Amino acid sequence: MEDRPLADLFEPATRERWLGLVEGVLKGADFEKRLVAKTADGIRIDPLYEPAEPIAQPTRAPGPWRIAQRVDHPDPATASAQALADLEGGADALTLVFAGAPAARGYGIAATRVEDLDAALTGVMLPLIGLRIDAGARGLEAAALVKSLAECRGDALADLDLDLGIDPIGTLAATGTLGAVWDEVAPKLAATLTDFDAAGFQGRALLADGRPYHEAGASEAAELAATLATAVAYLRALEAGGHDLARARDAIGVLLVADADEFLTIAKFRAMRRLWARVEAACGLEPKALRIHAETAWRNMTRRDPFVNILRVSMATFAAGIGGADSVTALPYTQALGLPDGFARRVARNSQIVLIEESSLAKVSDPAAGAGGFEALTAELTEAAWAAFQAIEREGGIVASLSLGKLQGRIEETRGTRARNVANRREALTGATEFPFLAEKPVTVLDVAPVAAPPASGFGAGAAVACEALPSGRLAEPYEALRDVSDAHLAKTGRRPAVFLANLGPLSAFNTRATFAANAFAAGGIEALGNDGFSDIDAMAEAFRASGTSVACLCSSDKIYADHAVAATEALARVDGSTLYVAGKPAELVDSLNAAGVQAFLHAGCDLQTLLTDALKRATRA
């Protein structure tokens, strides 16, 4: 036998061969509907891509990204202890969250004096770590405190890897107020940088933050466009304030949100670098790697079955690292429930350590380069974001767009679509809308009451820029509200609201739909009362009457529905006060079943949130 490489022994893998196999599996079904997806921006995602030529772009400096941990405990001594534990446990950067900042979620460091900040960072050697400030409307005050702290400790600003995180436009987007008109704020930003540079500062003073837009439900292109428009506004402000473009460029960083959609997150981070390179080119600057911070998505965090957040956060961290983030702040899995304890903080940093040290993700620069899917998605996302950025510019820039409500209006449309997708479970949240666990055990968070934010002078006084604040929400909140009603009913009565599964026929006939129905109802806190199935309709109705609930869901196969569904629902409807649902939606029987007393049909793509809201009201009524 001729000695050939193993690959030569097989027929070449071609797109044509693959399409032939796909057609055999689809059996005439529509290829586009079954295998082609689209993003919130309408970008097409194909199931298969050819290899692509890598596109050169500025990337993160060689080596791992920084592992950043939030410091947000109101008590300075506890904050210091947490920070030291994080740094000793493998983190090499801190995100200092001040009380009153949108990201503080009601907590945060309440430092108003340099002594307060020093106490919160006792034992922390600033020259050895990365430090990002997250202070919201207190951005200028916080920056001054950090500068004073460095002076008191004898730390040269030139030796610090420091992001001051000053972001008045992000504050405007998140809170609806700026405290002064932009023409008064912009010179203050330039003056602040001048003051810091005079002291040897070489870091980044301003931050273009994508979180307000992501938390409001924005698409990837909209988040990128708003972030880029903010960065450009800061670039103009610094240049107008006397800084040369090269220093102004270096004084700006960005923060993007990483979520569990790894493909879009990777493409988004790569696209941000390409977008900024376009701005640099327009300014006559040689492209230079942009400092990109990542924080995992608040929007995707859940209060129910919070351990699933570990998976979401790990996937988001993976995507941010692959996408080229310079630092990643991973939200602890209990963040939506309160201040995380030491274990949750440890899990947040260890997930990054495993990805860097054991999975070796940081050993390759831009590992997605040349992958057809990522290159295509990055390129299309870049163009979509650039078009959205140009729209903001035509409206007068990011401040004007926010003041006029233009950007908010576009994000609201996307948010509405996203909310509908969560309601009908096209956008799934494991543990909340999919595979809910009604027997979950409570997790531990620190027993710390929310704190009032110290008064903030903001970015100025006098006539203020005001706009409609972008909402900050988590996708799971509507379902969590239903679960709260269920918990209250359990506490009051000793049992959860329940649905009787009217399983008709043998196990093989009803099992698939009964399992689907049980999981769907559990998403609203409604416990499914299962059984081995009934062959006698009257016996099934009697079992429903004795179940102690007034809500029933008929579950069986299409064949049995065709022969017995109408009679079965009529029998169930004779139970006093009954509310009936059917798992599935047999098109030819819909009118007859509605006439027989069926309230709604439970099927893939239905508005589950509305169905559960109604079912819960009926299951908990006196």
Image: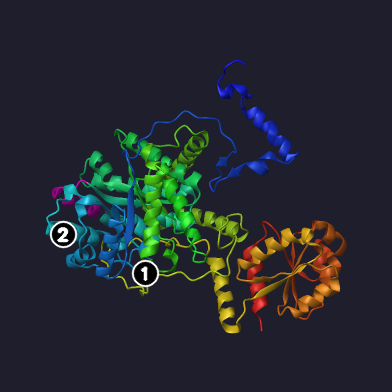
- Residue 340, above or below 547: above
Q: Mostly what secondary structure, the magenta segment?
A: helix
The coloring applied to the image is rainbow
* Amino acid, disc 1: Gly
Lateral position of residue 29 relative to residue 376, left or right: right
Q: In this picture, is 495 found above or below 9?
A: below
Residue that numbered label 1 is attached to: 106
Q: Position of residue 216 (x, y in %)?
A: 47, 58
* Element class at badge 1: loop
Q: Magenta segment range?
A: 186-202
Q: Position of residue 59 (x, y in %)?
A: 35, 37
Q: Based on the picture, tell me whether residue 190 belongs to the magenta stretch.
A: yes
Whether 316 is drawn above or below 464: the answer is above
Please report the residue visible at 26 percent of the width from the left and 56 percent of the height from the top. 184
For disc 2, the marked residue is: 148
Q: Where 274 falls versus 93 (above or below)?
A: above
Residue 203 appears anywhere in the view: yes
Residue 174 - label: none
Q: What is the quadrant of residue 358 in the picture?
A: top left
Residue at 45% in and 37% down:
368
Q: Nearer the viewer, residue 394 or 96?
A: 96
Picture quadrant where residue 510 is located: bottom right
Tell me the quarter of the image containing the C terminus.
Answer: bottom right
Q: Residue furthest front?
A: 1
